[in-house]
Image (cartoon, grey):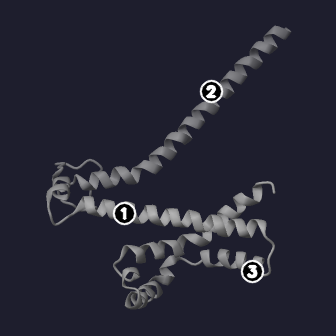
Amino acid sequence: MSLCDIRLRGGILKKRRSMVKRIVQYIVIFSTLAFAFFPIIWIFSASINPGGTLYGQRLIPKNPTLEHYRILFTDDRYPFILWLLNSLKVSTVASAITVFLCALGSYAFSRFNFRGRRPLLLSLLLVQMFPIMLAFVALYLLLLWIGKYIPFMGLNTHAGLILVYLGGSLGFNTWLMKGYFDTIPH
């Protein structure tokens, strides 16, 4: 066997390994995409199902209809545009306040050495370990009580919902941003 044959065989093996590696990568990518998009496809399928149920449904309904969408966008009982604008308003305000407050808090945790810094950081982490479902009743009662004294921040208000979102996201996001600020040189 000559040196040329060995090089040729090595090149063929490299190409074969490279091709197998690429095929495996594509299989993983397409499997991940299918796994990610299946719930969206299933929900769309349920929305065009004339029965309007998720139980016993096929992926492609027998008699698909867009009637549910027509009702959603034209019936006055369902103010979809108002719902969408409310969602955008609440999420935008909550996100902006979260980023601002988390940046302030995480910068302080990252750059300053103060008394009680470590216990506060650990308490942020500890609070995030409990699921939010444990706090539903407490949040309801808290918003009910706040609404008696500050009506625009009570139950069934955008400000109250923003407060709940802030309470749920500040701990984790502060911890996350602190890790980012730690990577920036002083």
Q: Quadrant of the N terminus?
A: top right
Q: Nearer the viewer, residue 64 or 138?
A: 138
**Residue under pointer 3:** 119
**Mark 2: secondary structure:** helix
CA gap between label 1 and label 3 equals 36 Å
Q: Earlier in the sequence, mark 1 or mark 2?
A: 2
Q: Residue 19, labelled with which disc?
A: 2
Q: Nearer the viewer, residue 86 or 18?
A: 86
What amino acid type should be assigned to the residue bearing mark 2? Met
Residue sitting at x 21%, y 54%: 49
Q: Quadrant of the rendered structure where residue 47 is?
A: bottom left
What amino acid type should be assigned to the residue bearing mark 1? Ser
What amino acid type should be assigned to the residue bearing mark 3? Pro
Residue 93 picture location, percent across and down: 45, 64
**Is the residue 149 above or below the residue 106 in the image?**
below
In front: label 2 or label 3: 3
Residue 168 picture location, percent across and down: 53, 73
Residue sitting at x 77%, y 19%: 10
**Is the residue 10 above or below the residue 183 in the image?**
above
CA gap between label 2 and label 3 equals 53 Å
